[in-house]
């Protein structure tokens, strides 16, 4: 015996047919909130990943700037070497005129340079004579 389905346009009959045929199913993912929670979880993970990558990039850039600036400072700092040379005192020279001629920015003032000249040359006073030789200090960034 074959079941035949008759076509009808009566809405009550259509509803009753579908009601009888309906099988009990487990709730759909969309209806129980699973899909929304899963989507939110993926969004949170994505946001966390983007923030983490941004922070790591910022740390690397800041760290490289500190390392780069310390290397730059080290490269800009030249070593200064102190040397001595001998000069012949000319007519009209004094310790002050010699200091004016040979002093460098490494001395705080002219008096400090003259004190060093006197100590280097065992001078008991500031009198010097032409034709004599004095040892004078000077600084250079060139190693000799």
Image: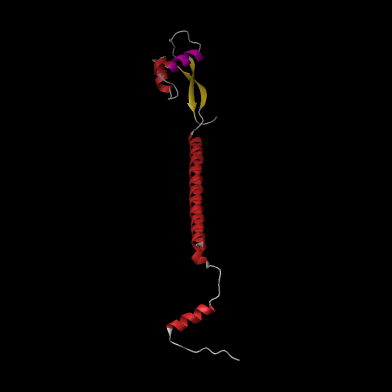
Asked if residue 88 can be seen in this view, the reply is yes
Is any atom of residue 131 visible in this view? no
Viewer-closest of 77 and 80? 77
Q: Residue at x 53, y 79 (%)?
A: 20
Query: Residue 70: where, in percent of width, then height?
Result: 50, 37
> Viewer-proximal residue, 67 or 123?
67
Residue at 46% x, 82% y is: 14
User: Which percent across, then down, holds residue 89?
Assistant: 45, 16
In this view, the residue in front, 36 or 48, is: 36
In the picture, the quarter occupied by the N terminus is bottom right
Start and end of the magenta stretch?
112-120
Q: Which quadrant would residue 125 be assigned to in this image?
A: top left
Residue 40 percent coordinates (x, y): 49, 58
Q: In the rendered view, tell whether residue 124 sits above or below residue 72.
A: above
Chief SS of the magenta region: helix
Q: Is residue 113 magenta?
A: yes
User: How many marks are shown on the rendered structure?
Assistant: 0
Q: Quadrant of the C terminus?
A: top right
Identify the residue at horizontal 52%, vertical 66% (top origin).
Answer: 29
């Amino acid at each position: 015996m074959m079941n035949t389905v008759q076509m009808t346009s009566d809405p009550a009959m259509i509803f009753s047919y579908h009601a009888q045929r309906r099988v009990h199913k487990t709730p759909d993912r969309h209806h129980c909130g699973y899909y929304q929670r899963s989507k939110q979880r993926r969004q949170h993970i994505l946001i966390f990943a983007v923030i983490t990558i941004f922070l790591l990039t910022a740390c690397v850039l800041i760290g490289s700037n500190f390392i780069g600036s310390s290397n730059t400072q080290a490269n800009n700092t030249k070593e200064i070497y102190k040397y001595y040379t001998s000069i012949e005192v000319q007519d009209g020279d004094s310790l002050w005129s010699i200091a004016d001629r040979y002093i460098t920015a490494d001395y705080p003032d002219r008096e400090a340079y003259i004190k060093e000249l006197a100590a280097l040359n065992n001078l008991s006073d500031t009198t010097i004579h032409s034709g004599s030789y004095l040892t004078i200090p000077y600084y250079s960034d060139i190693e000799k």
